Image (spheres, helix red, strand yellow):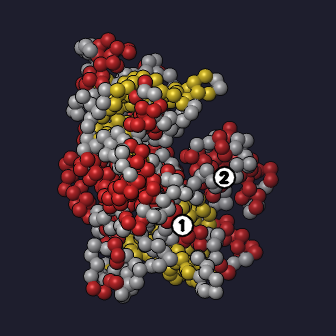
Amino acid sequence: MSLLTLRSLHIFFRSTSGSIKVVSDLNLEIEEAEVFGLVGESGCGKTLTALSIMGILPQNAFAEGEIIFRGTNLLTLDRESIRRLRGKELSMIFQEPTTSLNPVLTVGYQVAEVLTTHMDISKKEAMNTAIELLKAVKIPSPEIRIKEYPHQLSVGMKQRVMIAMAIACKPSLLIADEPTTALDVTIQAQILELIQRLREDMKMAVLLITHDLGIIAENAQRVGIMYAGRLMELADVYELFNNPRHPYTTGLLESLPEEKGKPLKPIPGFVPEPDRLPSGCKFSDRCRFAIPECNEKEPELIPLSIASNKSNPPSPPFAKGGQEGINHLPLTTRHSSLHLVRCIRASEILWRS
Amino acid sequence: MALLKVNSLKKYFPVKKVFMTAPALLKAVDGIDLSLDEDRVFALVGESGCGKSTVARLIVRLLPPTSGEVLFQGKNVFELSGNNLKAFRKSVQIIFQDPFASLNPRKSILDTIAEPLKIHRIVEKTRIKDTVVELLNKVGLGSDILNRYPHEFSGGQRQRICIARALAVSPKVIVADEPLSALDVSIQAQILNLLQELKREYRISFLFISHALKVVHYFSDSIGVMYLGKIVEHAKTEDLFRKPFHPYTEILLSSAPTIIVQSDKDVRSRNLKLRTDMGEIPSPIDIPPGCPFHPRCPKKFEPCDNVIPELKETDGRLVSCHLF
């Protein structure tokens, strides 16, 4: 059984004129000890997905569907039960370490607080463990550092403290939401290396959220590409970069500068507001491959083998289409070789080889 | 002759003033030289805190220098005043990193872009509106936005508005301080294409400041790598990316994550090997003695911790390292 399963997850924002759907029908599975990369531009719903797993969505947002962690649906748990899981089994590091730490408490206290909350240990023991943890995240002279306040540390050091807090109770899932976006490349490389090493040592799974395809290529094993609150493509990392099939994925890859002087092929337009998405395929208004059919019905996220075999009617369980077909998907996403894509022209999208 | 020349430019900021003692100095820019020719792109790269944005601000005269000079068409810009200064402002424009903070929220787009036209009396009053529309078209925006306000736009659109405002005075040089880093990947490519078109069409020179090495590689002709207020390597873009000389450049290049697929596993492992855990950039308040990079350098040897290396020419480029 997989560690975390998202099944038909929808996330809405309440507004004066009804609710706006910002994440729609998300299905994915994260296995024990794997790094799953979630890629997308700002506003695509990747952070909201992370917050819903942690049970810390903003007040005006709510989630529907199932978030199954080790057999329990987190969305049905009461606040106290999820509080006991959060920080212990599930933990998260955020993009901005500077705003994520409490400025009036020492970093040692903040790390130790996680331990005293979830484990039955004294403050003194917790402080000693905090020193060990700071050592594990390679903070020099941790005995001195635990008595310091966040403003005395550099951004990279603060992110290390955040990681120390996140791994304090040896969680089985670490959600890293843009963990290195605020950092310099040299520090970024160190932090990612640290996360990888801790993952191997502690056998924890990592949900790595980023917009940087390079980070994904180097760190993740499986990747989901999100656009407008939907998964557009899901595949093994090598498969995704060797054989991307969704026009959005290829668009992202083509946006990266490569050869000097060769004009870039950016994705035209900009991400639409969640309440003004086009009908049918949500990427159709920016897609170079769009045809009238694209606006008729939103394509489903289906295996590439079936998507590229449009002329032959696909065999069950995917033939039923609609809600039922989708329900079968989580079973199959487990195979790492499986490549899912949400595009009716996927078979025609060929990436330069 | 170089269009823009920077000679041993220094900027120290006094910090931590303790009573009756001389203030400590933060050496943000510690003696740099560079020159920008017509129709060229010079890029400055380096980690945050290395002083690259301070250089940008000094060059457009938003900050007074501690010492040194910036020559634009042979004249020291810090000595300009009156009409000469106005002419300089017209020739050198700047685009900032954060398009959310660099537009006045209370001014409509028409007013924002018309302001430089009015100040420099570029066109007659009756032609202002038409000129603004032309400028907006140049950056890929329509005339329908004239009476709208900055908050109605996305980051990419705002950056286009900032570029239109910079273009209003037909500058010869644009200083672009991290113009892409606040934008999404797909929008970055749009803006980069736009900058490239403008360069081709109007022969504008760019001083391009960035930490995104891929973008720098793509857009620039030559590069200065900055470390703690100094340029440690100065080379042609192609040369630098083919073979970095300075150990810092080498680490910087290998740190950038790249999309490498299965077939290039060797490249990947080589990069990983180079990425030594070299710690963090020291504070520019107490710069280490000797080579400022020596505490983090994997190749340091005997003279590094007491002799400051000079920037000297090696193989057609400038490097400050005892190895060369």
Distance between the alpha carbons at the discs numbered 1 and 2: 19 Å
Front residue of B201/A171: it is A171
Q: Earlier in the sequence, mark 1 or mark 2?
A: 1
Q: Is residue A205 above or below residue B123?
A: above
Q: Is residue B80 above or below residue A51?
A: below
Name the outermost residue toward the top. A320
Q: Is residue B174 above or below residue B129?
A: below
Of the 4 image quadrants, the one containing the C terminus of chain A is: top left
Residue B308 visible from this viewpoint = yes
Q: Quarter holding the N terminus of chain A? A: top left
Image point 62% across, 27% down: which residue?
A15
Q: Is residue B72 above or below residue A68?
A: below
Q: Which residue is mark 2?
A: B103
**Mark 2 is on which residue type?**
Leu
Tell me the subunit letter for badge 1. B
Q: Residue at x 46, y 67 (%)?
A: B44
A76 lies left or right of A275? left
Quarter of the image for residue A344 reads: top left
The residue pinned by badge 1 equals B53
Identify the amino acid type marked 1.
Ser
Q: Position of residue A130 (x, y in %)?
A: 37, 56
Q: Is residue A109 left or right of residue A236?
A: right
Q: Does B250 sit left or right of A183 as displayed?
A: left
Label of residue A1 in the image = none
